[in-house]
Amino acid sequence: MFRFRKPERRSTLDVWIACGFFLVAYIAAALLDLNDSWRLWTQPFRMIGLDALPMALAITVGIVVWFAWRRWQEGEESRLALSETVERLQVEVEERKHAQEIAQVLSETKNEVLDNEYQRSEQLAQVSKMGDFLAAASSPEELKEISAKCLRNLLPHLTVGVMFADKSFSRWQLHSAWGEYHERIHPHVDAEQCWVLRRGQQYADQSNTQTMLCNEANVTELKTVACYPIFCREMQFGVLHIRSAEWQEHILSAEEEKMIVGVCNTIGLHFYNAQLRAELSMASNRDELTGLLNRRGLGNTLKREITAAGQQGYKVTVAMIDIDHFKAYNDTYGHPEGDKALKFIAEQLASNLRARDVVARYGGEEFILVLPNTTKAEAYKKLKAMLVSINKASVSSSECCKPITLSIGIATSPDDQTDEERLVKLADTALYAAKKRGRNCVIPYISPHANNRIATTQA
């Protein structure tokens, strides 16, 4: 804080100046005979000392002049000091104002940085949570739903469309869209028209709406597009499409774009893993030769059907099928011809079933059928007709070296058994009875409590 400077003490120069003034006054009085004139004028007043007044007057004049000069000098010094102080105060005020502006900018910058860090931490938390949910997803549809929700949380203020490939990977179907212009995002895009797929990398365009390379993005309100592939190991699973009605050099900041690319890669990786698991599951659950489910692939299908039948009050019939004299067939015509015969039978069985029915290769030349909502009598009638049909088809087929016949045993739940393993065993028991009876027939299992025997109806 500035203060006014105190006037300096009178210096020796001031004394000499005062003496000079006095000497001038004294000499002037002497030269002009002022003293004599004054004594003459003040003769009547000698008693009160007026005759000595000229000398005192000279001294007084000198002192007054000296004091007047000093006052003027001090006034100038005070004015200069005040002017200097005002200038310094103005400088200090400007500096403080500038400092406050800097402090405000720093505070705003700090708050902005903190907000950005908070948003970034929230986004990272969402990405981490998304990874956990994607890892726990059990189907492609769940993967799509989780991915779309996560991307919507990460990009809530933009116009965004999330597309995923169909089963043939030839077309992209819009799964979810949001934002101001979401209703103008195309519901599907052909793979050959998508630049993301054709280039195998992200695509961005800030062109005029009539000259954009992406035909699917060419609409009047659109000025800028950015698309990011959802892929893994050259397999394209989806596309993240972002659009804007303004010309923007970058729709996303560099940090946001890096995060979104990472998220898309993570989603692609989970889709790839899901597809790989599905392929491995199919490979392990399918019979390599016939393409039918194997015993492992049959899995809990029968158990589920038995449970559903008990809850809904219908019956489930299981049929065990064996190709008659298949060992002799292989020995006579060779295993390659035997494989052709197996494939032929598999195709015939599959073509004669309803959509809900299940057929599997149980092992060797044995097959198993699961017929939901089918009584034993209905299954017997249907399978008996199937025997005739397959035998006739084998006569005219180039895949078969001779006519083929089948032996079939059937059992029904809940009439015979409600446990899936025991039900299959009962059907196998009926199959053994069919072979013993002479083959090329359908034998239903009859409970020992019913005349203590197995029916041996011949086809």
Image (cartoon, grey):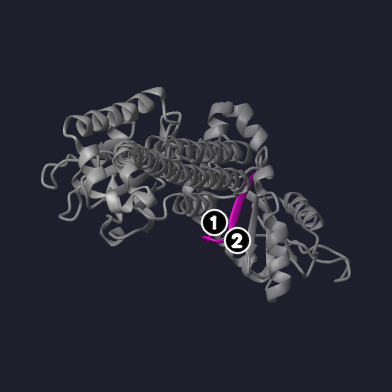
Q: Which mark is residue 388?
A: 1
The image position of residue 391, as x and y in percent, is 53, 50
> Label 1 is placed on what type of residue?
Val
Q: Is residue 271 above or below residue 353?
A: above
Q: Which mark is residue 44?
A: none
Q: Nearer the viewer, residue 53 or 4?
A: 53
Q: Nearer the viewer, residue 251 or 129?
A: 251
Query: Is any part of residue 76 visible from this angle?
Result: no
The image position of residue 332, as x and y in percent, is 60, 28
* In this rendering, position of residue 338 left or right of residue 167: right
Badge 1 density bin: few <14, some 14–19, many ≥20, Cα 10 Å: some
* In this rendering, position of residue 191 left or right of residue 131: left
Which residue occupies 32% across, 39% down?
Answer: 87
The image position of residue 426, as x and y in percent, is 79, 57
Give yes or no for residue 357 being in the magenta stretch.
Answer: yes
Which residue is under mark 2?
384
The image position of residue 410, as x and y in percent, is 71, 59
Give yes or no for residue 243 being in the magenta stretch.
Answer: no
Question: Quick check: marks 1 and 2 in contact, CB under 8 Å?
Answer: yes
Spatial separation of the CA atoms under disc 1 and disc 2: 7 Å
Q: Nearer the viewer, residue 129 or 33?
A: 33
> Label 2 is placed on what type of residue?
Lys
Local SS, label 2: helix
Q: Nearer the viewer, residue 127 or 236?
A: 127
Which residues are drawn in magenta?
Answer: 353-361
Badge 2 density bin: few <14, some 14–19, many ≥20, Cα 10 Å: some
